[in-house]
Every structure is written in C-alpha cells, then in structure tokens.
Image: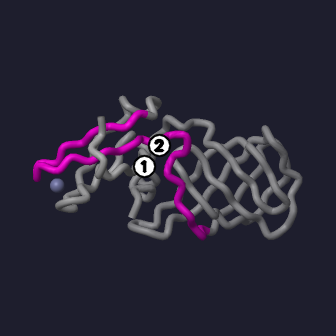
Amino acid sequence: MLAHDAVIKNVYLDTYGQAPLTCPTCERTKHANLAPHKDRHIPLKIKCPCGAIFVIIVDTRKYYRKGTQLPGKFIKLRSEIAGSMVVENVSATGLGFRTKLKYDLHEGDMLEVCFTLDKGQCAEICRTVTVKHTDDYYVGVEYVHTRDVDADLGHYLLPD
Ligand SMILES: [Zn+2]
C-alpha cells in the first residue's frame, strides 16, 4: 500500500541505467542505478536518509529524450547521398534530425551521422544509425550499436 500522500514521479534512465532521484521533502538528489528495475513498470518505494518515503516509476518505454538544436552532417552508406542537418532530439538509443532539403531516405537505410554537442567539451559525436521513420524533412534514427556507451553523449543526456 502506498501512503495516500505519496509523491509518484516518473523517472527516466540515462545511458548507464541511472536516474537522478530527488527527495520531495529535503530535495537531496541521489543518482541511483535502476537498470535492474527497468522493465518492471511497478512503483518503487524510495527511502531518503532524511526519513521521507517517496515513490517512483521507472519509465523505460521511452528513454529520456533531450530537445536540441545541434548542427551536423549525415552520409547515407553505400550511396552518394549526404547533407547537413539539425539534430532536434537525442536519446540513449537514437535521435531525430531535420534536413533543409528533401533526401531520398527510407526506413532501413544505414547512415553515418556526426554532430557537435553544445555543452561541456562540445565533443563531436559520430554514429552509425538505421532510419526508423521519415516525415518530409524529419528523420528518426536508431543507433546501430546502442551498447557503445559514449561518455560525452551519456553525460550530455543527464536531465538538467
Ligand atoms: Zn529527503
């Protein structure tokens, strides 16, 4: 049974399966490893050192997706197609970008994308991706190697 006044929050995992948990009473934040709970969709009771108890639900249907405006380039593998793009959102599993021109891109196409982060060291991130959907000038892709944890990207994705 949950206390009737329990604060229930959805939390998102980062690339490492961690999520920041903020106590609603004392506002202390702790990064907890929630990977073992990731597919369970059941509320977890968290006890803060201050004595407060709060409840979270690990939401992994969607990884945290960060809205961005990052300039980049893409190349369609085994083709002459290449162009510039603006990355509009990034998550631990993929990203979405918009192009200025319309390119011949379809679900299943393999691309190489490179874009520059706008925080910290402004690292350049390059990934091989698969096109998941296209909508005029917008292209949604998934990383081919989601297990390649990239420290720069992982850090960038920590919720502000
Ligand atoms: Zn607390």
Callout 1 amino acid: Asn
Mark 2 and mark 1: Cα distance apart in space: 6 Å
Along the viewing direction, whichever of 6 and 35 lies nearer the viewer: 6
Callout 2 amino acid: Asp
Residue 59 is tagged as 2
The verdict on residue 52 being magenta is yes
**Residue lying furthest front:** 4
Viewed as shown, does residue 94 lie left or right of 19? right
Which stretch appears magenta?
A: 42-70
The verdict on residue 75 being magenta is no
Q: Quadrant of residue 145?
A: top right
- Image position, residue 139 (x, y; %): 75, 54
Q: Earlier in the sequence, mark 2 or mark 1?
A: 1
Viewed as shown, does residue 8 lie left or right of 80? left
- For residue 120, above or below residue 20: below
**What residue is shown at x 77% (from left), y 47% (from top)?**
133
**What residue is shown at x 39% (from left), y 40% (from top)?**
17
Viewed as shown, does residue 142 lie left or right of 43? right
